[in-house]
Image (cartoon, helix red, strand yellow):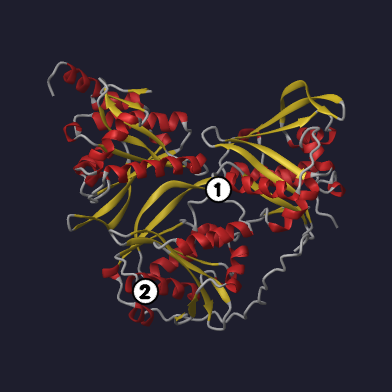
Amino acid sequence: MIEGTLVDFVPFEDDFAIYLETWMNEEAWFRAHLWERREPHTEHDVKKYIERMEKDEHGALIGFQAKNGDPIGAVIFDHEWPRVRKAEARFFAGDSRYEGSDEVLDALLMLVRYCFETRNLHRLDAVALPFDEAKLDHLRRAGFVHEGTLRQHIRWDGDYVDMEMFGLLDSEWPGYTAKVAGLDLQPSGLEPKPRLEKKDEKKDGAG
Amino acid sequence: MLEGLLVDLVPYGKAFLDLDHRWMNHEASFWSSGGERHFMSQAMIAARHAQWAEERERAGGGAGVGFGVQTKDGKPLGYFGINWLSAHHRVAMLGAKIGEPQYWGGGYGTDALLLLLDYTFDWLDVRKAWLMTTSMNARVMRQMEKAGFRLEVRQRQSALADGVWYDWLAYGLLREEWPGRAALVEQLGLRERAAALESGTK
Amino acid sequence: MNLEGLLVDLVPLGERFAALEHRWENGEAAFWGDVGDRQFLSLAAVKRRQEERAARKDQGLQSGFGIQAKDGTPIGVFVVGDIKPHLRLAILGVQIGDPQYWGGGYGTDALLLVVDYAFEWLDLHRLWLVTMSLNARVMRQMQKVGFALEARQRRATLADGQWHDLLFYGLLREEWPGREVLVERLGLRAKG
């Protein structure tokens, strides 16, 4: 566990991974994975995804939860290019109550810290939809620089939409502590959700 | 397969695979990879080819479409193709590597690019073609502009070449911006270029 | 992701459906979906088919949904299959496994959701579907939803000893007015 200001990072144990079965079908997931085809994800897909992330040395999937232990979402970095030490940063709030919150911003800052200060990356890429205000706001506040727009790059709900591209260099990162000091992060004060239990495998029919 | 004025696009067959060993260990790869330098044995190349074949099979609808580029009299020059195709977004990412330095410039790459663009838009019903190059590759940057691509993204300090940081640049071309190969051939004087080559002058 | 309709929701085709598919594949619903064929599929055989389906999905060649009633009861399966990316078309395959839910608008509600999804998200421009001339229910549905009867293969399938025609229906994106319009036109309403 790595402790942050408003959230803590945790590994994807079974009791956290079960949330992914819902989260991978939520809007926030798809907005964090623009390149993928929009389609439903089953338990099988979730399992395969976690296995793939675990095996991949050039990336990581990390859960984050509120200080009261309530699972909120995940941060990811992947598509690492070892030679130039760059990777793509992703983040999403599976629990949509936290969309746009400082908890998610803190998770992003902790991801940046992890990538620069532990994984020794030199650069992070990030992408967002032009109408994803919450994500754009988080990226800007974290210090990501807008580097361009891939025009009409994504099919989205009947339209062709742009993909906004961002980058952050290690030389532009003042360190987690300095960053947080300048941001005045405010907790959302949300009550924890009822805990999701691992399903009984024998059950079939309505869930 | 796809016949141009200076080059033809053909399957990336044995003649090309055999040359991969030279091309991968060579200056051409430095430019196309944005600064990478390889040391690949024949065995490593063979293993990589096998891996690509397997990935192509697994990828199904998302697989790219690769072509070998050869001169009009059949000399293999390199690779031009769609590295990655997203069916649901209808976007194709292009890639190229001309392995023989004497054929850099002179219109060979441009001829291949125009053939590939017509194919991508007309046969695969793609709406957007894009590709990435690095800011050290002035030749490709010029070619992109001449062909009508727009510079869309500059990823700062994302490529390292001989100790110097460069930017990866993304160029994009929408189908509605593409006037067709015939118009570009005219605009860029490719016919004259081909004629000059035929008559032995360059 | 879920697609929410008035009578049904389309959900991931996960474990809740796996065991039921065995029942449905060996039942009356499969007779209609397989245009007259009757099969005897073991649980293992059904599992293998599901794995093949998952592999095709990974390759981008098809997309599947579970169909459930509003109260969460799984009632069937919907597949957008044989996706041809460069031709931007796909075949639709539906199976309402539980005969209780035949008629009543469940299948139509699911169809409207999937057509919107295929056009809006997968950027396809054509959808097609095959049924047999014995299947009056589907033929009526095709007409009401706006699919065109494009081809009739005469005496091409055998069902319980009788020859029937195979009917090929197609729908183009430019002909599709959108789910909202169809819901209105067909008077689809949530059940009380």
Q: Which residue is mark 1?
A: C58
Residue at left offset 30%, top offset 29% = B15
Q: Quadrant of the N terminus of chain B?
A: top left
- A54 above or below B4? below
Dividing the picture into quarters, in which one does residue A90 lie?
A: bottom left
Query: In the image, what residue type sits under mark 1?
Result: Asp
* B59 sits left or right of C16 in the view: left
* Chain letter behind tag 2: A
Q: Which mark is residue A113?
A: 2
Say if residue C184 shows up in the picture: no
**Badge 1 local density, few (<14 within 10 Å), some, or many (20+)?**
some
Residue C153 placement: quadrant: top right
Which residue is at a point 83% across and 36% down the rendered structure image? C137
Q: Position of residue C41 (x, y in %)?
A: 76, 44
Q: Please determine whether, in this image, residue C181 is positioned above or below residue B201.
A: below
Left or right: where A187 falls relative to C89? left
* Residue B6 picture quarter: top left
Front tag of 2 and 1: 1
Please state which of residues B18 and B158 is positioned toward the viewer in this rendering: B18
Residue A54 in view (yes/no): yes
Q: Position of residue A100 (x, y in %)?
A: 51, 70
Residue A121 in picture, x, y percent from top left = 31, 66
Q: How many numbered circles are shown?
A: 2
Q: Kindly report the distance in space between the C-alpha atoms of the residues bearing marks 2 and 1.
A: 33 Å
